Each structure stands twice: as structure tokens, then as C-alpha cells.
């Protein structure tokens, strides 16, 4: 088999499998979210359709497909139809560069377990994920509804603000790896240890801005039910409404997978490091896939846990947090980290490895303790009245 | 700042977002493992701490005598008192001069379930029922005729609390 043919066949298979798994995963995430929130509220949640309610997503999908589609009389019809597609597509596209398992060795060659192992890896994610905001803004604009428009405006301001903090926090990862390819980031973490230790503060910043990027509680201002009805998707019904939900959940899935990849070693097992440069045999690949799924679902559950715990920020608090807290902190952190890496690499002449990671972990723990101490003073996220009085 | 707003100087522990978040997340996590309060309706229709009140007023029931005939004597008091005007009664008379209803229909859609018909009935014939599951496939099924009213088997409402008949 020629390498080109082999590449095409494996890529097509990977695309189909990844797409299917994400769509099914998203469907089940809606069920898990509903069951989990019910449990947190001492209820049982949907348990009627199928065993433990497992067929509920199918029932929801069926319902959404056969429901009537409504079009607001004064909506911009083309944009109104286009908006769900625009928000849905980038949400799925971003997953393409995330390695979900160790490469598989076959007799025709090594198959990287990622849809597209792009050299620009992380830059692609930053580029595509910021396209998602267009879908939301256009939905808000095209609906010709003041609440939808407000939701769209909030979404654009919020996502642009937090994109900066998110980008800054990931620059730390790229500084350490010296590369933007995500499979290289994983290899780098295998040499030292997981970035959660050596880049603790970056992880904290990334976690917060990823919450804001995916419009999840406590940053769900674009769809604040209490004040904006449902924000940008107020006017949508049936499958179009569902598309926004699929987009939201696949964004959440991608953000979780990204956190697992950037800070928790991706498919790496942690205790033993399998050298995957020549590819691994199938059972090892399956184990790494399981490890990756476990890490990703942990973050998905964390998202849900946060959602059903926290109240929503006020809009000025959101903006103040984004611009006055997250951005300066990430800039200062990046400066300190770059200096630390420079000192370790150039002055001490260390190459990346266990000791390097340990030294960075020390720096990060100190910084993190300082950060928590400052945050705990209660001056950063507080009411307007309190801030004015201070 | 608006005039008269008093800003409280709260201690750090009560204004820290981080501590509040951690506390809240522990609380929600602990609730996952607590017993659930959901009553699984079609299977369970009551629990140790929830039962329907005996005064519940639901769809009607006509009581019958030993021969299986409706106790109603077609006196006309219930259509007279009915505030929703949902009872249709056409009286008839047999050879012995006993009045009985030729037509007795209750439109359960119009009914407001006030229970006046039961209260006013001198023969204790018409009753509002201790019953609430009323799904039907068509609207006309909600007009109950005499036969159907007699065929109902659910318990009847007590209208007042037997332990406290005067409502004290």
C-alpha cells in the first residue's frame, strides 16, 4: 500500500470515528449533566427512557428534529439559518488536532491517533475556537430581538476578553515545550512530568478562562436565563436550538480535552512512560485512549460540578476579572516563568527533564500560594459597593 | 454611591470568593450521595410523608342504591347551585310517581370542583371524588353521563376534615 493511500484511508476512518464519538459523547453529556444536577438537588433526573434514562438523548434528538421550526417575522433569514451552523462547525473542528491516544504501529506505517497532526497545532485551536463567537453574535443579531442581541454582544465581549488570558496561559506551555504541536507537548511532558506541576498557575488561569470561553457558569452571561431569557438563542427552536447546545457541549469537550493534553499529559499514563515515537501495539493504544478519555471526562465533570454550584457573575465583575485580574496576572506570570526557564536553561545549563520540572514546580507552587493568598483577601471578586469603599 | 447605603466591613473569611467556592462545591458534592426525595409517580402514588388530603375534590361519582339505580331524585338542586353551570339534568317520573333523572350529565371541563353539588344533595347521591387521573383521548369523553358517573368506583371526597368538621 502506498503511503499516500494509507494516509487517506486512515484519515478518513479517524475523521468518521472522531466525529461519531464526539456527537454521541455530546448527546450523553447532556444526559450526564441533567442526572448530575438532579443528584446535586436531591432529585433523580431523567430516568424513564431506557435503563437509567440512557436513551433520553435519542428521545431528545427525535423530539428536536420533528418539532416545528419558527422564524421571527423580522429576522434576517439567511444569517438566522447560518448562525447555528457557524457556531456548530468550529466547535467540532477544534478537536481535529488533539491527540486522543498514542500512535499505533501497523505494518504499513505508524498511525498518529489524531485526526490531523498539524505542525501549527495549538495555533489552529486558538484560531478556530475564536471563530465560534461569530455564530453566537450572528445568532443574536439576526434574531432581531433585544435580548438575543444583548446576549450576542455579551458573548463577543466576553470571549474576546478571555481569549487573551487563555492565550497567555497557554504560551507558558509552549515556552516549556518549545513547540506548538500538541503531540510534541505530550512528549515533552513524558520527559519531565505533567505540566500540572511545572505550570500550576498557568493551569489555574487556563481553567478559569476556558470556563469563560465556553460560556459556562459562572460566566454564562450570554445566555443568562434570568435577565436575557436565553440570550442569543432565545428565538431559535427545534434542531437549530439543539445545534447551539451541541456546539456548547462540544466546546466544553474540546476545552476539557485540551486541559488534559496541555496540563495532564494527554494520553500519557503518568507512572510508566511508553515511548511512542515508533508507535505502540494495539492494546497499549487502547489503554492510552482510556487514560485520555478518563482525564477528559474528569474535566467535563468538573465543569458540570462548577455549573451546578456557582452563581453567575455580574457583567462588570466579569469584565473586571478578565481585564484587571486575569490579564495582568498572566502577563506577570509569563514574565517570571520565562525568566525562570531562561535561568535554568542558560545560566544553569540544564536540559529539560525531571530536575528541570521539579525546579519549575517549586517556582509555581510559591507563585500559586501567593496568588491564592491575594485572591483570598476578597478584593478581587467582590461587589461594586465593597470595591468602592475599599 | 447612593445616599444611605451602609457598606459593611465583612471579615475576610466571608468575602473570599475562593473559600466560598470551595465550600459550595463540597456542599453540592455531598448532596450527590444523599437520599433522593423524588416520588416516582406512576409507580408510587404516595409516601410515608405525603398522602392526598381526604378533602380532595376530583371528578364526580354518583352513588347507587341496592338495586344499582342512581340515588338521584332529580330534585334540581345541583344544577341550581352549580357556579360553573356544568350539570345538565332532565327529570323524569315513573309509574309510582318517583322522580329520577332521564339525563344527568356533568361536563368535567366546565366544572370548577367546588363541591357544592355534593354539599347541596339531599339524597347524598352526587359526590366529588378522591381521584385525579383524568387523561382521555378526546374532549367529549369529559362529559360524564349518568351511566359513567354511576360506574365510577373511586372513593368520594369528605369535603371537610373528619377530625375537625367545623374547620377550627
Image (cartoon, rainbow, N blue to C red):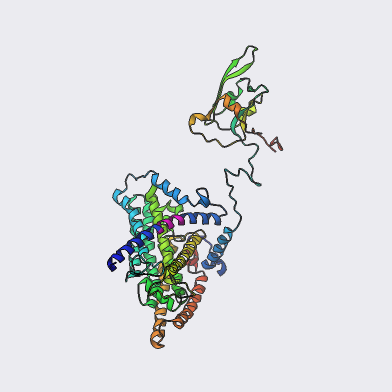
In this view, A362 is above or below A312: below
Quadrant containing the N terminus of chain A in the rendered view:
bottom left
Query: Does residue A260 show up?
Result: yes
In this view, A377 is above or below B149: below
Q: Position of residue B115 (x, y in %)?
A: 61, 31
Q: Position of residue A180 (x, y in %)?
A: 35, 73
Position of residue B51 in the picture relative to residue A102 (left or right): right
Foreground residue, A163 or A55? Answer: A55
Q: Where is residue A328 in the image (x, y as percent from the top left)?
A: 41, 73
Position of residue A162 in the picture relative to residue B72 (left or right): left
Magenta span includes A28: yes
Q: Position of residue A270 (x, y in %)?
A: 48, 73
The boundaries of the magenta stretch are A21-29
Residue pushed farthest right?
B163
Foreground residue, B133 or A184? Answer: A184
Foreground residue, A149 or A6? Answer: A6
Q: How many labels does the image show?
A: 0
Position of residue A341 in the picture relative to residue B154 (left or right): left
Residue B148 quadrant:
top right
Magenta span includes A11: no
Identity of the residue drawn at 57% across and 44% down: B41
Q: Is the magenta stretch mostly helix, strand or loop?
A: helix
Identity of the residue drawn at 27% across and 67% down: A4
Residue A8 quadrant:
bottom left
Amino acid at each position: 500500500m502506498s503511503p499516500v493511500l494509507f494516509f487517506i484511508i486512515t484519515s478518513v476512518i479517524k475523521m468518521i470515528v472522531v466525529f461519531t464519538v464526539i456527537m454521541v459523547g455530546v448527546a450523553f453529556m447532556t444526559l450526564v449533566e441533567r442526572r448530575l444536577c438532579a443528584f446535586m438537588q436531591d432529585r433523580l433526573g431523567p430516568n424513564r427512557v431506557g435503563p437509567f434514562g440512557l436513551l433520553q438523548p435519542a428521545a431528545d434528538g427525535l423530539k428536536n428534529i420533528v418539532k416545528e421550526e419558527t422564524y421571527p417575522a423580522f429576522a434576517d433569514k439567511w444569517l438566522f439559518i447560518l448562525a447555528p451552523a457557524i457556531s456548530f462547525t468550529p466547535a467540532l473542528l477544534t478537536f481535529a488536532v488533539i491527540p486522543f491516544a498514542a500512535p499505533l504501529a501497523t505494518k504499513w506505517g505508524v498511525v498518529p491517533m489524531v485526526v490531523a497532526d498539524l505542525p501549527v497545532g495549538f495555533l489552529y485551536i486558538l484560531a478556530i475556537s475564536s471563530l465560534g463567537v461569530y455564530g453566537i453574535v450572528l445568532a443574536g443579531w439576526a434574531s432581531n430581538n433585544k435580548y438575543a442581541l444583548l446576549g450576542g454582544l455579551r458573548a463577543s465581549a466576553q470571549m474576546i476578553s478571555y481569549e487573551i488570558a487563555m492565550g497567555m496561559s497557554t504560551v507558558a506551555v509552549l515556552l516549556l515545550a518549545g513547540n506548538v504541536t500538541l503531540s510534541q507537548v505530550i512528549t515533552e511532558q513524558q520527559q519531565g512530568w505533567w505540566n500540572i506541576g511545572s505550570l500550576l498557575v498557568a493551569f489555574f488561569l487556563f481553567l478559569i478562562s476556558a470556563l469563560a470561553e465556553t460560556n459556562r457558569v459562572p460566566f454564562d452571561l450570554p445566555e443568562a436565563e434570568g435577565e436575557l431569557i436565553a440570550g442569543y438563542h432565545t428565538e431559535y427552536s427545534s434542531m437549530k436550538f439543539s445545534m447551539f447546545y451541541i456546539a456548547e457541549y462540544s466546546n466544553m469537550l474540546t476545552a476539557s480535552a485540551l486541559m488534559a493534553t496541555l496540563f495532564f499529559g494527554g494520553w500519557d499514563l503518568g507512572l510508566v512512560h511508553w515511548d511512542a515515537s515508533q508507535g505502540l501495539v494495539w492494546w497499549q493504544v487502547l489503554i492510552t485512549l482510556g487514560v485520555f478519555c478518563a482525564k477528559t471526562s474528569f474535566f467535563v465533570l468538573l465543569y458540570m460540578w462548577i455549573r451546578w454550584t456557582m452563581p453567575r457573575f455580574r457583567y462588570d465583575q466579569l469584565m473586571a476579572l478578565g481585564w484587571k485580574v486575569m490579564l495582568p496576572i498572566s502577563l506577570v506570570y509569563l514574565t517570571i516563568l520565562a525568566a525562570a526557564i531562561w535561568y535554568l536553561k542558560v545560566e544553569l545549563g540544564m536540559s529539560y527533564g525531571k530536575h528541570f520540572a521539579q525546579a519549575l514546580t517549586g517556582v509555581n507552587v510559591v507563585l500559586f500560594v501567593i496568588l491564592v493568598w491575594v485572591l483570598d483577601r476578597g478584593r478581587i471578586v467582590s461587589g461594586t459597593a465593597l470595591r468602592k469603599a475599599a | 454611591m447612593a445616599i444611605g447605603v451602609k457598606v459593611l466591613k465583612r471579615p475576610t473569611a466571608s468575602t473570599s470568593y475562593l473559600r466560598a467556592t470551595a465550600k459550595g462545591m463540597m456542599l453540592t458534592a455531598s448532596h450527590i450521595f444523599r437520599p433522593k426525595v423524588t416520588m416516582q409517580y406512576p409507580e408510587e402514588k404516595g409516601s410515608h410523608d405525603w398522602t392526598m388530603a381526604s378533602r380532595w375534590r376530583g371528578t364526580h361519582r354518583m352513588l347507587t342504591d341496592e338495586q344499582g339505580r342512581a340515588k338521584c331524585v332529580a330534585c334540581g338542586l345541583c344544577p341550581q347551585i352549580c357556579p360553573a353551570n356544568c350539570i345538565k339534568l332532565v327529570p323524569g317520573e315513573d309509574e309510582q310517581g318517583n322522580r329520577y333523572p332521564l339525563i344527568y350529565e356533568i361536563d368535567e371541563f366546565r366544572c370548577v370542583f367546588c363541591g357544592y353539588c355534593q354539599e347541596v344533595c339531599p339524597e347524598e347521591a352526587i359526590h366529588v371524588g378522591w381521584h385525579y387521573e383524568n387523561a382521555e383521548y378526546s374532549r367529549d369523553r369529559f362529559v360524564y353521563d349518568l351511566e359513567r358517573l354511576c360506574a365510577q368506583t373511586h372513593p368520594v371526597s369528605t369535603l371537610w376534615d373528619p377530625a375537625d368538621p367545623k374547620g377550627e
